[in-house]
Image (tube, helix red, strand yellow):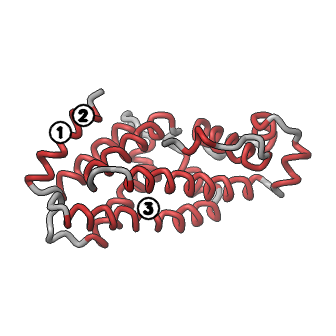
Amino acid sequence: MNFEENIDLTDTKIKILFSAIGLFKQYGFKSVTMDDIARSSGISKKTLYQYFDNKNAVVIETMTWYKHGMRCQCDYIMTNSANALEGFVKVKINLDAIYKELNPMVIHELQRFYPEGYQQFRVNMEADVAAVKLNIEQGIQEGLYRAEIDSEIISKFHMESVLMMMTNKTFTQDKYSMYAFSKEIMEHYIYGIVTPKGEKLYRKYKEQYLTK
């Protein structure tokens, strides 16, 4: 399931949001103009301003819309996976596809130039923290994650690690790609929480899903 493949582009506002997120992911937030967004959406600048007062409004609503779509997509994957570990691996595959095409400066620019949009992004991340916490608790019940883990602390730590990768210049301007950093963060995270049973299953899933 990819929510971007099922978007109704006959809805003008949705088409604007879809076009805007594509531009932001590729070029970052700073350089993209309202003219660029209108052109990519196939509408006039006048029409664009009928839906959004300014670029800041576009940024805020685009981020909220995209995060909601991704959250629904990840929830669907988790719900339709055999266990917590398989769900984690499949979500990782989904996110890897995004990291491979994402401008490494995108969240750093959001934080610096659109603080209101960044604050909304942080608020929306609470749903991600809750989803990771739920996955940890499910994995513990299934005997795949260590029982002594504090799911609340680890879920927050994990999401802050991911955010650090996207906002810290040490990472965003390094010679390694965001995908490379994401891969190492995910490996560090999963090997820190799995039981021997979980580790064995994770190696199986890596071979099944991640080495193709």
Q: Nearer the viewer, residue 120 or 209?
A: 209
What is the distance, in whole Å, between disc 2 and disc 3 at their CAs? 25 Å
Q: Name the element at disc 1.
A: helix
Q: Quadrant of residue 68?
A: bottom right
Q: Is residue 131 left or right of residue 109?
A: left
Q: Are marks 2 and 1 in contact (CB under 8 Å)?
A: yes
Residue kind at label 1, given as amino acid type:
Lys
The residue under the point 73% across, 53% down is: 58
Q: Earlier in the sequence, mark 1 or mark 3?
A: 3
Residue kind at label 3, given as amino acid type:
Asp
Q: Nearer the viewer, mark 1 or mark 3?
A: 1
Q: Is residue 197 left or right of residue 103?
A: left
Residue kind at label 2, given as amino acid type:
Gln
What is the distance, in whole Å, between disc 1 and disc 3 at their CAs? 26 Å
Q: Name the element at disc 3.
A: helix
Q: Nearer the viewer, mark 2 or mark 3?
A: 2
Q: Position of residue 112 (x, y in %)?
A: 59, 56
Q: Residue furthest right?
A: 46
Q: Earlier in the sequence, mark 2 or mark 3?
A: 3
Residue 6 sits above or below residue 81 on the image: above
Q: Name the element at disc 2.
A: helix
The residue under the point 27% across, 56% down is: 84
Q: Which residue is mark 3?
A: 128
The residue under the point 44% across, 36% down is: 97
What is the distance, in whole Å, between disc 2 and disc 1 at their CAs? 6 Å
Q: Position of residue 96 (x, y in %)?
A: 40, 39
